[in-house]
Image (spheres, grey):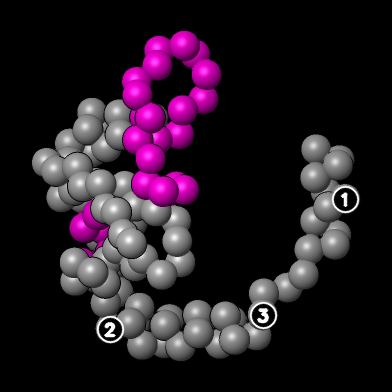
Amino acid sequence: SYQGMLRMEFAKPLPSYLVTRYHGWKATAYKDNQGWYRRLATEGQRPRAMVISCCDSRVHVTSIFGADQGEFFIHRNIANLVPPYAPDGDHHGTSATVEYAVTVLKVAHLIVLGHS
């Protein structure tokens, strides 16, 4: 929309440290694993499990489990809440994510990861 375009004019560029980290990742981890990333892009994702986690920046799901890219389908929200199913036509991000993970991706496990 026109309003959205106006807001984008005032968007700030990424901080230089993030740009530097991205270029470092692309030159090392991506370069060393191009075949893996190509497979993920062409064959799609086939995660073993879905993880519902808090969006707290201190919770790093893949590091906790030593997982690789594509191994988990991750949904993050405040307090890793899983609201009850409600077929009311409203937007339900968590339940839609669970439904997609189970019916489309065929994940074998659903992990709700809490923290203190």
Residue that carries the numbered disc 1 in the rendered image = 6
Q: Which residue is mark 3?
A: 15
The residue identified by callout 2 is 32
SS of the residue at dot 1? helix
Q: Quadrant of the N terminus?
A: top right
Q: Is residue 80 magenta?
A: yes
Checking the image for residue 17, the label placed there is: none
Q: Are the residues tagged 1 and 2 within 8 Å (C-beta)?
A: no
Confirm whether residue 19 shows in the render. yes
Q: CA distance from mark 3 to mark 2?
A: 25 Å
Above or below residue 105? Residue 89 is above
Does dot 2 land on a helix, a strand or a loop?
helix
Q: Can I make out residue 44 in this image?
A: no
**Residue type at the position of mark 1:** Leu
Q: Residue at x 35, y 35 (%)?
A: 82
Amino acid type, mark 3: Pro
User: Disc 2 residue type?
Assistant: Asp
- In the structure shown, which secondary structural element does the residue marked by tag 3 occupy? loop
User: How many angstroms separate mark 1 from mark 3 (CA)?
Assistant: 21 Å
Q: Position of residue 31 (x, y in %)?
A: 34, 82
Taking the view exactly as shown, the residue that stands out farthest to the front is 116
- Answer whether labels 1 and 3 touch (C-beta < 8 Å): no
Instruction: Tell me the residue at 33%/62% (across/down).
Output: 116
| Distance (Cα) linking label 1 and label 2 | 40 Å
Instruction: Tell me what residue is drawn at x 19 percent, y 71 percent.
Output: 66
> Along the polypeptide, which appears first: circle 1 or circle 2?
1
Residue 64 x, y percent position in the rendering: 23, 69
- Segment tinted magenta in the rendering: 67-95
User: Which one is in front, 15 or 104?
Assistant: 15
Residue 23: image location, x then y, percent:
50, 84
Q: In the depicted view, which residue is nearer to us: 73 or 37?
A: 73
